[in-house]
Structure formats: C-alpha cells, structure tokens
Image (spheres, rainbow, N blue to C red):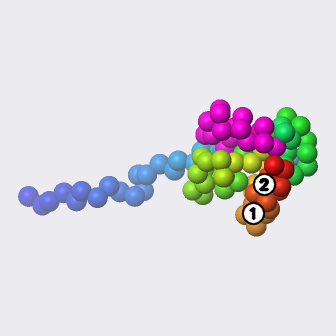
Amino acid sequence: MAPVPEKPELSRREPVITRTTSLRCSVAFSASLKKRVRQKAHYRCCLCQAVLVEVHHIVPQGEGGPDEEDNAAPLCASCHEIYGANPTKRKFIREARDLVV
Ligand SMILES: [Zn+2]
C-alpha cells in the first residue's frame, strides 16, 4: 500500500480576506487607555484640533502595532485616513501628539 501524502493541498486553502474599515482599528485599546489618551489631548485631534476624536493606532495592528499608549493617538476620522494610511507620516502623528501635552 502506498503511503498517503499528509500535506494538505494548497489549492484547498480558502482565501480569508476580511475587509476591515478604519473604524475597526480603534477597538483593541482598553477603555482606560483611550480615556487617558483623549484627556491628554484635551479631547482634540492632535493634528487638526477637531473635537470628539477617536483613539487610533499609529502603527496598525496588522503591521504589528501594539495596543499600548505609545502607539495610540487621538485623531479625527479624516486625519486618521490621511495619515494612518501613510507610513511616512506616522512619525509625524506621534510628534504632534506629544506636543499637545
Ligand atoms: Zn484631525
């Protein structure tokens, strides 16, 4: 009897593509951390000073960004869209955030 190969066929793999919206990325921070980050920034976007902001990951979780305060920035939706998607501008988010304190 011939041995059956144990390797699963790659073609059977189902593509797991979950489209996440930009809103999803603010979920992983704890409530207390988000509160602290917002308070530090006086509840304003650290880039454009808009009020009522969300706390976003500077480096997205998908790229290994930790759920830590250093990686959290208070941003409005539009700034998050503009800067969060642009790796070269992420450094600037952190600088702007730390300026607010
Ligand atoms: Zn903004």
Q: Identify whether 3 is placed above or below 34.
A: below
Is residue 16 part of the magenta span, yes or no?
Answer: no
Residue 89 appears anywhere in the view: yes
- What residue is shown at x 85% (from left), y 45% (from top)? 45
**Foreground disc of the pair 2, 1:** 2
SS of the residue at dot 1? helix
| Residue that lies at the very extreme toward the left in this rendered image | 1
Residue linked to disc 2: 98
Figure disc tally = 2
Query: At 83% from the left edge and 37% from the top edge, which residue is drawn?
Result: 43
Toward the viewer: 68 or 6? 68
The verdict on label 2 being within 8 Å of ligand 1 is no
What is the quadrant of residue 11 in the picture? Answer: bottom left
71 vs 10, left or right, is right
- Look at the image and give the residue range highlighted in magenta: 21-41
Determine the image quadrant of residue 82: bottom right
Residue where numbered disc 1 is placed = 91
Q: Residue at x 77, y 39 (%)?
A: 38
